[in-house]
Structure formats: structure tokens, C-alpha cells
Amino acid sequence: MGLKDFLRRVFGKEEINRKDLPLGRESVEPVKPFLPRALDVRYRFVDPRYPREWIGVIEKAVMANPILSQTHNLLIALANTGHRVTVQGRQKKEAEGEIEALAGSINTDHLINQLTSQIAIGGAISAEIVVKEDLSGIERIVRVPVSTIYFTYNEETDEYEPYQWVGNEEPVKLNPKTYKYIPLLTMDGSPYGVPPFLAALSSIETMEEFLAELKGLAKKVGLLGFLDVKFPPLPKAPNETETEWQERLLQYLENIAPQIENNMSKGIFLHYDGTEAEFKEITPNASGITELVSLNEKWIIEGAKAQPALLGYSEGVTETWATVSLHVFLSQLENIQMLIKRFLEYAYKLHLALKGIDFEDVDVEFEPVPDFSPEKTAEAELKKAQYVTTLLQAGVISVEEAREYLGYDPSRAPTVQREVKQWLNGNGTRKETNTSRGY
């Protein structure tokens, strides 16, 4: 479809002017009609769709709950695959040297792990770039706790403005040039990121209550039985009332019980003639406990948006569904990497600008996530390459189109050659990257 065809279909004519399109936004942000006109900024904060305290609950659950802890660790371990930085511009070598030095000073690998954890727990990147006092570059990057971030809505600019509010201190307005809040997912009309583990909290609470009940049951399950001792009743004194007699019987049993327990621990039992003793076994009914625990664990995994097969819960999972689950999880990792990519690119560009280095663009590219089925992937790539080669030989596509279709970047030719040699030598298909410098 050509430009004129598109304009004719949408506007009914081949040219457009200002009357055809509205200038500016016509829709209204949902929070706008409810904003108070108070001067104190604390009364103008927009509330998130969930209690802010729940982020702290998620942090504790990540440390205490085995499933969330494992999911959290899995996200960090698989998301940080190492990354490469590509700089375009006249001073490319100088820019790459400065980025390498910056990556070492701020420990980019550790920063990526922290940002991944922040996204998993708080649902967003919340970090501030600290600039040196002499404006000669970036000094460090600090994480700002997501739970301390508050937003106000600016009607004039139609934007949400971030503040940090801690304790009784006055709220601090954060500069958008150095502070970045990048959410993974937001609800309509809200600037706050939705924590991925949020839906697992209710199941975790149920699990904690259930485990508390299991502690009492565990004592019964581990108990073999009990000794039933029957004493002949003490004779009632002539001047003794019924109440006094019952109290004397109870006092006698309370006094004799420690003696019986002490004798039983020594392997003997002493008693008067007429006393009956019988050992009774107990077999508590623990059926259904495993099913209840497994069901609640399944709810926690689903609430955390994790994949059971990757966490070791593979009951009744077919190979096809396991493959689908793996691709879903890898897509989640790529979404997390995309947020970190945008943040690092902005930080690197700001650092180069402060250094006065001429550049056109800075691109951060994460290494591919681990391939869990390299044989199938290699076979698919081979068939794809054969198909493209056939089209190229037939003159249907050009060499450039073939490269684009195969996703081949000529600048990565040395890297590809090295990967092929490693694969032929049996060292695996994954590239060993030097991530200690952020590359």
C-alpha cells in the first residue's frame, strides 16, 4: 500500500492538514478529576492499585518461601547472560574505552543482578544515576527502593512526576534526567509497576498457616503410641464429700504420672496389684496432606508467573507443554533484559555526553539465553539457511535480504567464526563472554 492509498483510505483524500488531526491529547487521565488542590505535595500523591506495604511482604517471602526464593534466583541466574556494547560515531574507540572503564567502576554485572531482582520484587527499575560534582561523568548508580516512590500527576505537561518519600522526611522530587523508573507492567491510569510475584501472596499466607498446623501433626505422626494405665479407684473416706473425693483422685493421678514416666524411660514399670497397663498404638490419618501441599505449591508457582517444570514440578507435563513453558519463561527473561537494556543505554549515553565524546548511538545487546535444545535449534537454523540459499540462487532475493532474513550481522563475523570453531571442537554452542567488564 502506497502513501496516497493509505491517506485516501484513512482520510478520504491524498493530503492531510491540521484540521484532519487533533493537536495534542483529547483523552483524560483517570486520576485527573480526583486530584486534590492541596499545596502540600504529600496530599497529591497518586496511590498504586495495591497496598504499598505488599512490596515489603514480597521481599520477606522471597527470602523465606522456598518456591519464591528459587524463582527469584532462577530469574537472576538466567537473565544475566552477559552483554555487548556497540558504539557508533566518530570517536568509537574512545567511547568504548570509557564505557569499559565505567562498567568496571560501577560493577555492571552486579548491577544487572540487582536490577533483575528489583524488577522481580517491585515490578520496575528504580535507580538514580549519580553524576560527579565536576560533571566529568557518572560516579555511581544507586537503586532507589520501589516502595518509597510516589507519583504526582502534572496536568500541564500530562506526565507523572516521581518523588521519594521516606519516613518523616520531606518528599524529594527526583530529576528525570538522572532518575529512571521503568515499569515492567502497569495498569491503565496508574504509573506504578505491578510486582510479578503479587498474585502469589495469598497462597503464601495459606501455606504459612498450613505449615503451622503441620508442626502439631508432625509430633503425632512421629509418635508410636501411648501407655494406658488403669488404677483401681481409691476408697472414699466416710466423712469425704463427692467433690473432695474427686479432687483427691485427680491429685493422686497427677502425682503418680511423673513417676510412671520416669520408670518407663528406664525400661521398667512398677505398680500395685490390680493396676492394668496397656500400650496402644496410634496411626494418625495423614492421607491427603501431600495433595494439599502440592496444590498450594502449584498456586504459588502460578501466582509468581513461574513455570513448574523449571522449578522441578513436572507431574503430568508432556514434552510439548514443557517446550511451551520454556519459551514463555524465556520471553519473560527477554522482557526483563529489555528494561535493563534501555536503562544501561541511557546511562552509557549520559556518561559519554558528560565526557564530551562524540557519538551517534550506543546499543546494548544481551547474549542469548541458554539454549536447552541446541540440536533442534541447529537443525532448524540449517533448514532455514538452506531455504534462504535456494531463494538467493533462484534470484528471488538479494544477498542483503538473505542476510537480513537470517539475522546475520557482518560486524559479528569474527564472533560467529569463533562460536563455530568452539562448536566443531565440542566445546558447546554458547559463547564464553567476559562479563566482568560489562561486555
Image (cartoon, helix red, strand yellow):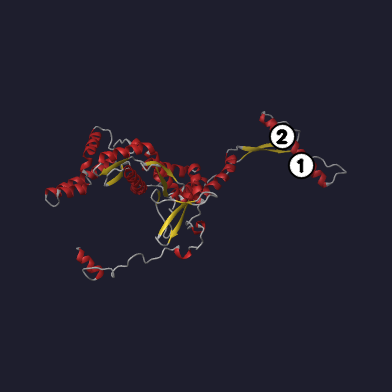
Residue type for callout 1 = Leu
Q: Which mark is residue 250?
A: 1
**Which residue is under mark 2?**
258
Three-letter residue code for mark 2: Pro
Depth order, front residue of 84/386: 84
- Report the disc number at residue 396: none
Residue 16 visible in the current orientation: yes
Q: Is residue 384 left or right of residue 172?
A: left
Q: Nearer the viewer, residue 301 or 343?
A: 343
Residue 42, placed above or below residue 65: below
Left or right placement of residue 226 versus residue 425 in this view? right
216 or 350, nearer to the observer: 350
Q: Earlier in the sequence, mark 2 or mark 1?
A: 1
| Secondary element at tag 2 | helix
Residue 396 position within the rendered picture, expressed as x and y whole percent measured from the top left: 13, 52
Secondary structure, mark 1, is helix
